[in-house]
Image (cartoon, helix red, strand yellow):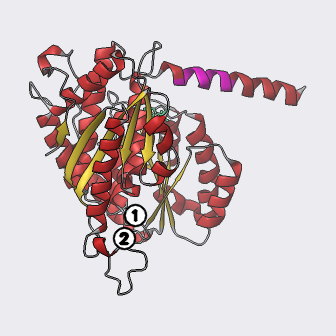
Amino acid sequence: MIYFQPLTEFPRMKNTDCPSMKHYNPVTVQELFAIQNVANQVISEAKVFLVIGVGGSFLGARAVIDALTPYFTTKNDVEILYAGNNMSGAYLNQLLTYLDTKEVYVNVISKSGSTMEPALAFRVVKKYMDKRYGKEARKRIIVTTDAEKGILKKIANKEGYRQFVIPSDVGGRYSVFTPVGLLPIAVAGIDIEAFVRGGRQAELDFSSESNSAIDYAWNRYALYKQGYSVELLASFEPRLNKLHEWWKQLFGESEGKEHKGLYPSTVNYSSDLHAIGQFIQDGSRIMFETLIHFDTIEGDMEIPFSVDNIDGLNYLAGRSMNSINSTSKDGVALAHEEGGIPVIRIELPKLDAYHVGYLMMFFMKACVISANLLEVNPYDQPGVEAYKDKMLELLKEDMVKVRA
Ligand code: PA5
């Protein structure tokens, strides 16, 4: 289901060679049903679904929604918007103005319930919803958080909001198969049953003794040991940009600790070939590239024939844009390999919910194996806590200054 072309010079590693992997149990059928029910109600009543969350609490949903939503429209007339992933006052202010003319539902997502960015955004949005909808705001705000702990949990209980649970043993960046990812994905009109089925199949396939997730992890590790310090994730379909962002966070937060780890970077081709392509081909030899490709992408089109052929492109007439894009990918891989950039290829048959689920589980499994090879804990993020502590210290200092 996934075609992975390993770099041939590396020996294959087996599952038995790597430390134990934590399993990700996607939701049960009953949970899936409950999520879809709430999503259906939102779809019938809302024009905007505002997802408030940061890091693992929104990147997975956004990755899937962007990958599977048409470019210039929505699947079902509900626009998915995001807040709480930045602290721009202008963004929040303009967002509220934009919301004013549309029916709004809100999903605030935070496992800890106390992350500053979503907490601030929710304070503002809650006030807006209360003022605009009065008692009805209660029905329009859905909380996804821990089953027992946290400030958000307290607020949800007090206000009587509907709640979904983030399982306590699933970290943010591994949570796309829980209500964290699934509710926004369902509201966007994407088939969550197919998405979860893809993830579940990958879970099975990549638990075998020898498999592509292990090969990918092993190849990355071997390249790292050879002195490569950057992995570039690349694809040729603009809709995958946010999937790149999700991947970047998954590997960056899981591996980058104790002064170890590959720096996960991303490029969007063709656009970036004309921005950073020169450096990749010919700059410092610090990176290798991982190319993602989906064979079939719906809504393709043919290059038309031109009678005068002034642009000289008739040799491509009748070919589909996707096939040209795919040839461009092969050309880029060859050029980069010749230029000294090792290229790992990951190919899937179709850009749909099933295969996106499959790919995301592939990456999560590979990420845990990779972190284990580096001997770091894939599930914590002590470096992120460090910035939060400093920020709080400074904010409290500011408060003292203001009061003085
Ligand atoms: O992957 C992670 O664990 C992090 O990116 C968290 O998801 C992010 O920091 C948000 O945390 P929370 O859901 O507690 O607000």
Q: Main secondary structure of the magenta part?
A: helix
When asked about the image quadrant of residue 280, the answer is: top left
- Tell me the quarter of the picture where residue 286 sits: top left
Name above or below for residue 136 compared with residue 109.
below
Q: Are marks 2 and 1 in contact (CB under 8 Å)?
A: no
* Rendered image: mark on residue 249: none
Direction from residue 252 to residue 275 in the image, left or right: right
Residue 17 position within the rendered picture, expressed as x and y whole percent measured from the top left: 15, 14
Label 1 belongs to which residue? 42
When the figure is inspected, residue 100 is found, relative to residue 57, above or below; the finding is below
Quadrant the C terminus occupies: top right
Instruction: Return the disc, 2 or 1, that comes first in the chain's sequence.
Output: 1
Three-letter code, disc 2: Asn
> What residue do we see at 41% from left, 20% from top?
261
Name the residue located 47 percent from the left edge and 54 percent from the top edge.
Answer: 271
Q: Which residue is mark 2?
A: 76
Residue 171, above or below 48: above
